[in-house]
Image (tube, rainbow, N blue to C red):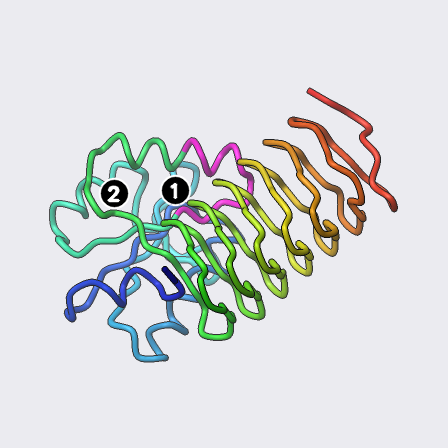
């Protein structure tokens, strides 16, 4: 089964309201992606962003409409509300997802696929995941929930990417790899084929991972070596 399109395409034909949780740089990117998706013909309406740490009003390109309590209020007012958590830090993104899910709102998550992302056949993509412009997911790939596949990052055939993973710009994940939940793959890093990276492990920018990495480690360099393990 291939899940290669945003959730909004499988829902009702009426317009869907999109709420972005977060108000920083990644939120600004997500807002622009949603706008591009609407321009491409998807029935989306960007409501704005919610952030506990920013005042209501415009913050650069981001419109902050309230704090976290706004999520529940809008969900009651907007039956077609969909949310995306736009925070690059994996543990923080997980905590915010858990806060939203604690509200018990069915079908709240959407998947954001920018029109310039490319997705091949037999790919599954979990809810709350973002595919940025220039990202590539080839074939027979499984990507979990609330993952960020950032600008020009790629995931090759038969790879499995866990939940809450962040593939930074230009990261390359080769075929048959396994990335555990919460992995952070730095900008321009490469994970070669048939490698496993343990849960919540960080791979530094530009690193080359040529052997399996344990969970909750930090690895840097070419080839990547573990410099810290929690």
Residue at 46 percent of width and 68 percent of height: 121
Q: Going 55% across and 56% down the picture, which residue do you hit?
A: 149
Q: Depth check: give the residue in front, 182 or 37.
A: 182
Label 2 neighbourhood size at 10 Å, few (<14), some (14-19), many (20+)? Answer: many
* Distance between mark 1 and mark 2 Cα atoms: 10 Å
Query: Which one is closest to the eye, mark 1 or mark 2?
Result: 2
Q: Earlier in the sequence, mark 1 or mark 2?
A: 1
Element under disc 2 = helix
Q: Residue at x 49, y 68 (%)?
A: 119
Q: Residue furthest bottom?
A: 40
Disc 1 marks which residue? 51
Magenta segment boundaries in residue numbering? 85-95
Where does label 2 land, which residue? 71
Query: Is 126 on the left-hand or right-hand side of 100?
Result: right
**Residue 230 on image: x %, y %:** 68, 20
Q: Nearer the viewer, residue 160 or 65?
A: 160
Q: Nearer the viewer, residue 67 or 172?
A: 172
Numbered disc 1: secondary structure? loop
Q: Does the magenta segment cover residue 214?
A: no
**Residue 5 in the image, given as x and y percentages of width and height:** 37, 66
Q: Quadrant of the N terminus?
A: bottom left
88 within the magenta span: yes
Mark linked to residue 164: none
Quadrant for residue 171, please give it. Answer: bottom right
The x, y position of residue 57, in whole percent, is 36, 53
Residue 31, image x and y in percent?
41, 62
């Amino acid at each position: 089964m291939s899940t290669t399109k945003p959730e909004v395409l499988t829902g009702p034909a009426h317009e869907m309201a999109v709420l972005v949780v977060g108000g920083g740089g990644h939120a600004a990117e997500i807002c622009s992606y949603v706008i591009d998706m609407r321009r491409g013909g998807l029935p989306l309406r960007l409501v704005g962003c919610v952030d506990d740490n920013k005042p209501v009003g415009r913050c650069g390109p981001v419109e902050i409409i309230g704090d976290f309590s706004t999520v529940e209020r809008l969900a009651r007012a907007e039956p077609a509300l969909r949310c995306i958590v736009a925070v690059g830090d994996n543990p923080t993104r997980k905590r915010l997802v858990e806060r939203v899910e604690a509200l018990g709102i069915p079908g709240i998550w959407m998947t954001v696929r920018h029109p310039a992302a490319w997705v091949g056949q037999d790919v599954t993509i979990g809810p709350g995941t973002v595919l940025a412009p220039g990202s590539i997911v080839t074939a027979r790939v499984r990507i979990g929930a609330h993952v960020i596949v950032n600008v020009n990052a790629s995931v090759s055939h038969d790879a499995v990417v866990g939940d809450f993973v962040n593939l930074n710009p230009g990261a390359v994940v080769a075929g048959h790899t396994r990335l555990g939940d919460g992995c952070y793959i730095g900008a321009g890093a490469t994970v070669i084929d048939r490698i496993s990276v343990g849960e919540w492990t960080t791979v530094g920018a530009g690193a080359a991972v040529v052997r399996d990495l344990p969970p909750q480690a930090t690895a840097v360099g070419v080839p990547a070596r573990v410099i810290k393990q929690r």
